[in-house]
Every structure is written in C-alpha cells, then in structure tokens.
Image (cartoon, grey):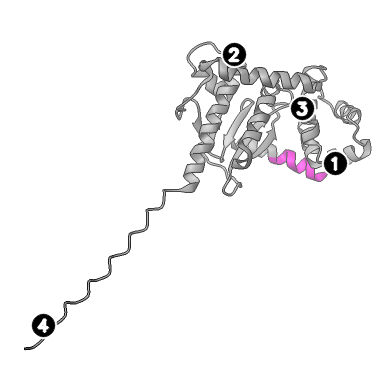
C-alpha cells in the first residue's frame, strides 16, 4: 500500500510539470475562493490555520489525501493544519467517531491512510460500530482500550464540535478547505472556473495552488503594513560663528 501511495503521489506531482492547465496564478474572490459570510475564530497565532473538511467515505478525499499530505509537509511551520470529519447521514457517524478515536489515541498519523485504503480498496463500509471495532483490532489496537476511547465523553464531545463546525462553515460537500476562518475553497470550486475539461488530479493540484496563495495572503495580512523606515537623525546644528574680536 505504501508503494501504491508513493506512485500515486509521484504521478500527481507529475501533472504540475506536464500540465500548465493546472496552474492558478491569480485566484479571484467569488471564483477560485469564497469569503465566509460569518468569519469563524482561528487559533493559530502567527501561523495560518488551514482546515480540511473531509470524510473517509468520500472517494475524492481519498484521491486528494496523498498530495494534500505532501502539501502540508511543504508548508511546514507556515500553517496549523487541522482535519474535521463531517457526516451527512447516520451511516457516516461511525467513521467520524473512528477519526476522533484515532486522534485521541495518538494513532491518527499511523492509521489515517489505512482507513481510506480499507474503504476504497478493500471496500469495507465501516458504517457500523462493529465494523469499525473489527478494523481497529486488525490494525493491532487493543480492543478494550479502543472501545473505551470510542465510547468516551471526550470523543462524543469532539464529534459534537465537528458537527457545529460543519454547520458554522456551511459545509455541503467534501473535500473543502477553510483558511483562517474566512476563506473557503475546494477542488470542485476551482475546477468549475478552470475553463476546460480537467482531470480530478489537475483540480486537486490547482486547489493546492489556491491554498498556497491564500496562505501567503493571510501571512501578509497578519504582518500588517511594512513599518516606515525610521527618519534619519537631524544634522547637528552648526556651531555659532565666533564673535569678531574687538580692536
């Protein structure tokens, strides 16, 4: 599976070199990105908050994930990256709780891509608690510890907060990105304005270019106007002319 994802990542970035059609150089408000009507609080300090609203059930999120992961690594300390799992029906709730549980157990980085693989390659539905527990045990997690976390108050609270965020950001489809609680973009938004038929991978890469641009925009906004250069010190007053000597 690791080899598959590496090949996918290489092919994905190959589109950047091969296809100028994926290039977005000057994103426009109302076109490649939108402004949230009600800005949401962002807690990233001097960095830029980037949120991916996604779902394990979503095939588009699965395709995007390898190149998105590489993009996050490339941004490094410029951003604070967060994922929020959405649900649009009850069948998605176990996956949302699985995400929250893996995060709480410190296993998300290790198993995040494996959940995608289980759903979109092995065709596991993961739409019930029993299916989710079976998956977790197959990954080597202690069954009782997983169940305790899965059913914990903290996980249920996180799921509740995710639902509130989904509503606050008016998320109706995934994957969707929110930048600094104000700007919204997605591969589908970007793809609609690219002006010609494009592949899904080209849409994904173009949306990451829009994210690059939005991150740089927010960084400039946080930096504020450049400080005016300090005024040069006034030259010292010339010494008064010596009085003429009396004759």
For marks 4 and 3, the one nearer the N-term is 3
Residue 133 location (% of width, % of height): 88, 30
- Left or right, residue 196 beside residue 99: left
For marks 2 and 1, the one nearer the N-term is 1
For marks 2 and 3, the one nearer the N-term is 3
- Left or right, residue 96 beside residue 24: right
- Left or right, residue 8 beside residue 204: right
Q: Which residue is mark 1?
A: 149
For marks 4 and 1, the one nearer the N-term is 1
What number of labels is visible? 4
Q: Residue furthest front?
A: 247
The residue drawn where x is 76% and y is 24% is 116
Kindly report which numbered mark, 3 or 1, lies closer to the viewer in this rendering.
3
Q: Which residue is mark 2?
A: 199
Kindly report which numbered mark, 4 or 1, lies closer to the viewer in this rendering.
4
Disc 4 vs disc 3: Cβ atoms closer than 8 Å? no
Q: Is residue 219 visible?
A: yes
Q: CA distance from mark 4 to mark 1?
A: 96 Å
Element assignment for label 2: loop
Label 3 Cα neighbours within 10 Å, binned few <14 / some 14-19 / many ≥20: some
Q: Residue furthest left?
A: 247
Q: Which residue is mark 4?
A: 244
Q: Which residue is mark 3?
A: 113
The segment highlighted magenta reads 152-161
């Amino acid at each position: 599976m690791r080899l598959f994802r590496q090949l996918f990542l290489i092919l994905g970035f190959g589109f950047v070199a091969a296809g100028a059609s994926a290039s977005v150089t000057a994103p426009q408000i109302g076109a490649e990105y939108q402004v949230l009507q009600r800005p949401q609080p962002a807690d990233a300090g001097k960095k830029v908050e980037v949120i991916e609203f996604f779902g394990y059930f979503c095939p588009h999120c699965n395709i995007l994930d390898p190149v998105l992961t590489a993009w996050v690594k490339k941004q490094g300390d410029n951003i604070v990256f967060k994922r929020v799992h959405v649900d649009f029906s009850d069948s998605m709730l176990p996956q949302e709780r699985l995400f929250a549980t893996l995060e709480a157990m410190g296993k998300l980085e290790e198993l995040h891509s494996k959940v995608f693989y289980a759903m979109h390659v092995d065709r596991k539905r993961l739409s019930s608690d029993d299916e989710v527990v079976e998956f977790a045990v197959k990954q080597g997690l202690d069954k009782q510890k997983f169940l305790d976390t899965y059913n914990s108050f903290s996980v249920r609270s996180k799921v509740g907060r995710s639902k509130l965020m989904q509503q606050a950001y008016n998320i109706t489809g995934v994957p969707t990105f929110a930048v600094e609680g104000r700007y919204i973009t997605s591969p589908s938004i970007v793809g609609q304005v690219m002006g010609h038929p494009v592949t899904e991978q080209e849409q994904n890469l173009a949306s990451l270019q829009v994210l690059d641009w939005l991150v740089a925009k927010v960084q400039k906004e946080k930096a504020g106007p450049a400080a005016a250069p300090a005024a040069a010190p006034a030259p010292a007053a010339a010494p008064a002319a010596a009085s003429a000597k009396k004759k």
